[in-house]
Image (cartoon, rainbow, N blue to C red):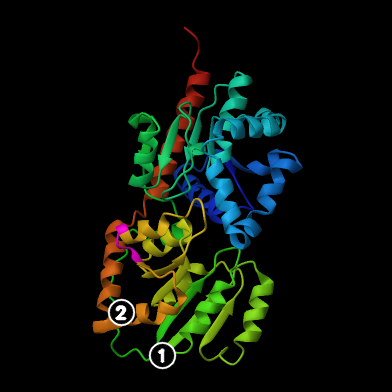
Amino acid sequence: MTKILFISSEKTGGGHKSITKALIEQLVLLSPDMQFTVIDGFKLGNWLLRFPSRIYDFLAVEIPVLWGFFYRLSNPFKALVNQAVAQNIRKSLLEQIQAFHPDLIVSDHDIFVGSIIKVLKRADLDIPVISLIADLDNVTNLWVDKDAKYIICPSEEVKQSMLKEGIAEDHLYLTGFPVRSAFCDLNLPEPHWHRKNKEYVSVLLISGSQGSTQVLKIANTLLKYENIHVTIIAGHNTALKKFMEKYLSKYIGNRVTIYGFIKEVKERMMEADILILRASPNVLMEAVNLCKPVIITGALRGQEEKNPQFVLKHHLGVYCPDIGKLPDTMTSLLENDGEKLIQISKNQYRFRKPEAARDITKLLIQTAKENNESRDRPIA
């Protein structure tokens, strides 16, 4: 029986879980007999490793300068990080391997690429490791390891970064960003958007799994204009949701709808004319796959810093870091019956790669099966 071990993360945002889910959906469809298991890499370690994952949301949202500083440190101290993580996870990882006997290990978190390879080498275990990069640009060197079987690149920008780090091109796979199947309609018709006969503009604000008080500022700015209806997804931040419900109570049921963490994100996206969000790669690429115009208002320090420029470079949306200028940005997008909106949607339509998760999964299946067969092959 061929087996794949996924190393992901549960608490450092929702992006890693979303990527893993996208791949598992395809794995079940393409190779239903293949076994797999998913492990939170941070849970392999002791409290010293688990602690950073638990405070990630707080650092990234509340102290972004500090988080950005830590993120940048990973490049000059890559060897030290890999060594420390390898020592921390070694015992638990080897126990998991002994129990599951994987034919392939896939990591969609950067700190578990080089560290896992170190553990395998020291234990003299010949299990291929695939580095599945979970960012669109500004990638840390922790993703890079010449002993990785393959490095999966979700964008041309990432691929060029890997080539600059000396990774051979035949070890790189340019696939596009993997998103869940619900967002990947291969038969999606080319988009058309018309402002005519619409009494109002529907705007969806997505604050990310962490939730952000900036969403309240955005909503407050937009609601000054009578023709705008706002839907807010507050994420796991229940305190923020309750505060917004109280603060915006006079609009709720009329011009405002507020959700906490929900599974029906696609449905809310499809109902909206415009999405306003942080430059989180997962949510951004889900919107692109649905051809929904986006306004990017910010990005986390570190891994997301270049994402607003990525959006502008590929004409996938607009960037408006100044909340006070949002009304002008909206007006510009809606001029001439939404001419700019439909152009953004068409750009997204050409850019989208709804087959990305399937293509990646095919590579994982092939690699795992090849390793499994080589183990079973008798020695001549």
In the picture of the structure, the residue carrying the numbered disc 1 is 227
Question: Residue 221, image x and y in percent?
Answer: 48, 83
**Lower sequence index among marks 2 and 1:** 1
State the residue at coordinates (38%, 31%). Answer: 171
Q: Nearer the viewer, residue 20 or 86?
A: 86
Residues under numbered marks 2 and 1 in contact, where contact means CB atoms less than 8 Å apart: no
Secondary structure beneath disc 2?
helix
The N terminus, quarter of image: top right
Instruction: Pick out the residue farthest to the right.
Output: 47
Q: Is 333 drawn above or below residue 67 in the view shown?
A: below
Q: Amino acid at mark 2?
A: Ser
Measure the C-alpha gap from mark 2 to mark 1. 15 Å
Packing grade of label 2 (10 A; few <14, some 14-19, many >=20) is some
Q: Give the number of callouts.
A: 2
In the picture of the structure, the residue carrying the numbered disc 2 is 332
Q: Quadrant of residue 245?
A: bottom right
In the rendered structure, which segment of residues is drawn in magenta?
A: 313-317
Question: Residue 184, image x and y in percent?
Answer: 39, 59
